[in-house]
Image (tube, grey):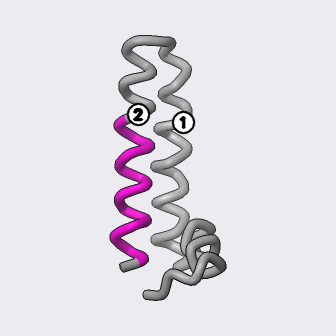
């Protein structure tokens, strides 16, 4: 359950930032890069801040 939420949030952030980059300003692509870097970091370290936040809200694996 938690993995699906993390993937959903990451995908939503990426799509929103792409739309903002097209219609508002290209600097929104930095947010896309941040989300991608965070996904890469979590795959290497096996630690994800969003998973910790979801745990505090009572969402289990």
Q: Is residue 15 left or right of residue 35?
A: left
Q: Is residue 58 left or right of residue 21?
A: right
Q: Main secondary structure of the magenta part?
A: helix
Q: Which residue occupies 50% across, 48% down? A: 35
- Nearest the viewer among 59 and 42 is 59
Q: Where is residue 19 in the image (x, y as percent from the top left)?
A: 37, 24
- Nearest the viewer among 21 and 5 is 5
Q: Position of residue 42 (x, y in %)?
A: 52, 69
Q: Which residue occupies 37% across, 15% down? A: 22
Q: Quadrant of the N terminus?
A: bottom left
Marked residue nearer the N-terminal end (2 or 1): 2
Q: Which residue occupies 43% across, 65% down? A: 6
Q: Position of residue 16 (x, y in %)?
A: 40, 33
Marker disc for residue 16: 2
Marker disc for residue 31: 1
Region of the chain picked out in magenta, as a range:
2-15
Q: How crowded is mark 2: few (under 14 residues within 10 Å), some or many (20 or more)?
A: some
Q: How crowded is mark 1: few (under 14 residues within 10 Å), some or many (20 or more)?
A: some
Q: Which residue occupies 50% across, 72% down? A: 44
Q: Position of residue 58 (x, y in %)?
A: 57, 83
Which of the 4 quarters of the picture holds residue 56? bottom right
């Amino acid at each position: 359950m938690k993995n699906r939420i993390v993937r959903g949030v990451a995908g939503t952030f990426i799509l929103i930032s792409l739309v903002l980059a097209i219609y508002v300003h290209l600097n929104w692509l930095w947010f896309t890069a941040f989300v991608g870097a965070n996904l890469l970091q979590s795959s290497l370290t096996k630690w994800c801040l969003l998973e910790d936040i979801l745990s505090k809200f009572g969402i289990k694996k």
